[in-house]
Amino acid sequence: MAQFDTIRSTTAGSRAAQIDEGLRAHMNKVYGTMSVGMLITFAAAWAISGLAVTTDPSAAVAQLSADKYLTQIGYSLYASPLKWVIMFAPLAFVFGFSAAINRLSAAAAQLIFYTFAFVMGLSISSIFLVFTGQSIIQVFLITAIAFAGLSLYGYTTKKDLSAMGTFLVMGLIGLIVASVVNIFLASSAMAFAISAIGVLIFAGLTAYDTQNIKNTYLQMAHSGDQEWLGKAAIMGALSLYLDFINLFMFLLQLLGNRE
């Protein structure tokens, strides 16, 4: 925010107005791209979970509960070794996308982002088997409200959040390691701690990433490189998308009602 004020104070009135307008358009593109990605993710998760479960025993491969059974698709996704590939595919996708972004056009980057959103939907589709539909909707609304407030804070605050961002990234690395370890330990106490810490980390990252997206635009606005700014908007959308998804998943672990 301080950087934004500095740039505006040293820029002629018409140019300052142009920067303001450009920033609004840039943030609208970030949030719009993110929203489309969210829609793809949850639509894919819901559709895939519908294909994975049946109430017809004759079409079942394995029993899930008293009146629900896994289809062949469901068994492949959630009970076969393929589940490990699906679990870690989004993480590999993010690293690969980040490494290749400079070689991609803005249009190609946007297409890959939407493909990633579908892969993420495949990865989290099991939530519709584990949690009640009502609790998923409730937690989604809670996440949306919290995300909006945190992102608004990151956009409007005059405080420099860069130091906090470094701390949060270090915490995120530790969280990923702890999550992988707990896959094998299966400790409920550790899972609760991971979820609680995860909520705090991604709440902070939402504010930090929003401010970082804004500052990145301001640093590059004078260049006039629309192709680069287009890719920056997609990478910003990816950052906020990941913040939202992870905040939602950790809150669901804490607040969701299980089937």
Image (tube, rainbow, N blue to C red):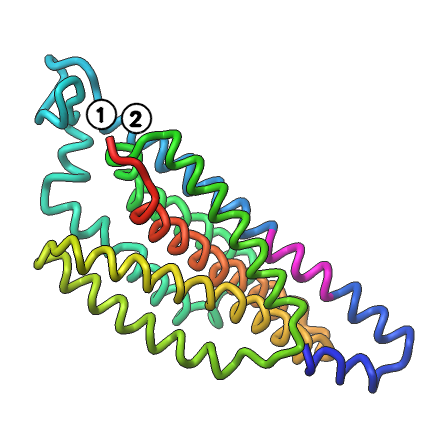
Q: Where is 67 relative to 107, above or below?
A: above
Q: Position of residue 188 (x, y in %)?
A: 16, 53
In this rendering, the count of numbered labels is 2
Residue at numbered disc 2 = 50
Q: Image check: 186 left or right of 163?
A: left
* Disc on res. 5: none
Residue 21, quarter of picture: bottom right
Left or right, 196 with respect to 138, comes to: left
Residue on which the image places disc 1: 53
Would you say 172 lies left or right of 72 here? right
Which segment did they paint magenta? 23-31
Residue most extreme to the right: 13
Kindly identify the residue that appears in the image at 20 percent across and 67 percent down.
178
Q: Quadrant of residue 44?
A: top left
Task: List x then y, in percent, for residue 160.
Answer: 59, 81
The three-letter code of the residue at mark 1 reads: Val
Tag 2 near tag 1, CB within 8 Å: yes
At 38% from the left edge and 75% from the top edge, which residue is drawn?
Answer: 169
